[in-house]
Image (cartoon, rainbow, N blue to C red):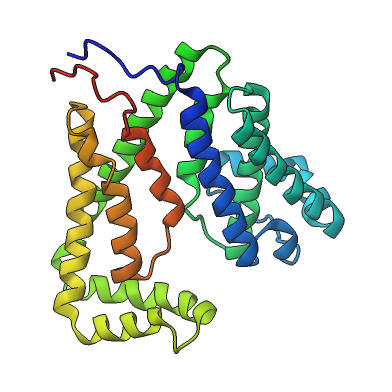
């Protein structure tokens, strides 16, 4: 039983600045990779039937008004960046947090439309922005803990999917993932990059590749420990970092933005008495 909970509300500024500071860095990284809305050459919103919220957004006609006009897209990208900076300065501003979440979801929809598939790398940021909607600190704490459980179940769901589909039993599964993922990555980094060397090496040594893939699956399964107790959180906070760094090294999957979810398992007050 937890006799003393983490009072995130009291530490709202501390956690908020860590979170929105990270979001700002990812936004700059996306700018330099030319994937902000004004850099996507008018993405078309037509991936219907994959997400209810996505379909509702498309039905409003709002995406066409923004992405169909270069200046409107530039205005959107700058506005969202300013929201991030304002929330870094003042994380307790819940109206700004709500605006950020809706704006960031709009960006995710545009990016998914451009890549023609549902990407998962930004979902962690979107989920973690919801607790900052709350006006009262106690509600921030409650929502933060709720998002923690959502993230745990997400990783465990990924583990179960691979387990029950038997993907870890196939000696060709890891190679198939690398061949598909590396195709896009190498088009961006070039055939002479470090990534190209890693891809070539692991495809030439499938035993090491499969070992790395199995390691990633094991880490995803370990996240389930956090569903029953928080005493392992000091270790679980490193799991998202290990999963996504390993995914990049072994599988050429760049999900670096998901590493921020480790913050959900960081307890600023180390003297918290957790007996379960």
Answer left or right for 25 relative to 254.
right
Q: Nearer the viewer, residue 274 or 240?
A: 274
Q: Residue at x 65, y 49 (%)?
A: 107
**Residue at 70%, 57% in the rendered image:** 37
Look at the image and tell me in which quarter the N terminus lies. Answer: top left
Q: Percent x, y for residue 241? A: 32, 52
The reply to whether residue 165 is visible in this rendering is no
Query: What is the x, y in percent for residue 161?
Result: 26, 51
Image coords of residue 128 (percent x, y): 47, 35
Left or right for 206, reference 86? left
Quadrant of the rendered image containing residue 162:
bottom left
Residue in the picture at 13% in, 65% down: 169
Is residue 104 or residue 4 the one in the foreground?
4
Question: Does any portion of residue 272 appear in the rendered image?
Answer: yes
| Side of 215 relative to 60 (left or right) | left
Q: Is residue 26 above or below residue 98?
A: below
Relative to residue 104, is residue 276 drawn left or right? left
The tally of labels here is 0
Q: Quadrant of residue 233?
A: top left
Q: Nearer the viewer, residue 50 or 223?
A: 223
Give residue 152's quadrant in the image: top left
Taking 243 as reference, is 173 above or below it?
below
Give how far across and how far down residue 264 sits, in percent: 36, 34
Quadrant of the snapshot with the C terminus: top left
Which residue is pictured at 30% across the width and 37% down the height?
153
């Amino acid at each position: 039983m937890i006799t003393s909970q983490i009072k995130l509300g009291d530490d709202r500024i501390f956690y908020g600045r860590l979170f929105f500071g990270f979001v700002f860095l990812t936004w700059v990284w996306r700018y330099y990779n030319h994937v902000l809305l004004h850099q996507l050459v008018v993405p078309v919103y037509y991936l219907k039937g994959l997400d209810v919220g996505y379909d509702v957004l498309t039905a409003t006609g709002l995406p066409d008004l923004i992405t169909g006009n270069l200046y409107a897209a530039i205005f959107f990208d700058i506005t969202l960046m300013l929201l991030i900076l304002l929330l870094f300065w003042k994380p307790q501003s819940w109206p700004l947090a709500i605006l950020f979440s809706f704006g960031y979801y709009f960006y995710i929809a545009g990016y998914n439309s451009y890549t023609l598939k549902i990407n998962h790398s930004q979902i962690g940021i979107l989920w973690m922005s919801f607790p900052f909607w709350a006006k009262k600190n106690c509600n921030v704490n409650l929502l933060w803990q709720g998002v923690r459980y959502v993230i745990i179940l997400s990783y465990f769901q990924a583990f179960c999917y691979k387990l029950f589909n038997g993907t870890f039993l196939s000696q060709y599964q890891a190679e198939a993932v690398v061949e598909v993922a590396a195709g896009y990555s190498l088009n961006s980094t070039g055939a002479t990059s470090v990534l190209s060397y890693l891809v070539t090496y692991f495809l030439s040594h499938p035993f090491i590749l499969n070992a790395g893939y199995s390691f990633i699956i094991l880490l995803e399964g370990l996240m389930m420990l956090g569903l029953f107790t928080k005493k392992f959180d000091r270790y679980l906070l490193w799991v998202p970092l290990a999963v996504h760094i390993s995914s990049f090294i072994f599988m050429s999957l760049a999900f670096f933005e998901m590493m921020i979810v480790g913050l959900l398992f960081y307890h600023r007050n180390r003297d918290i008495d957790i007996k379960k």
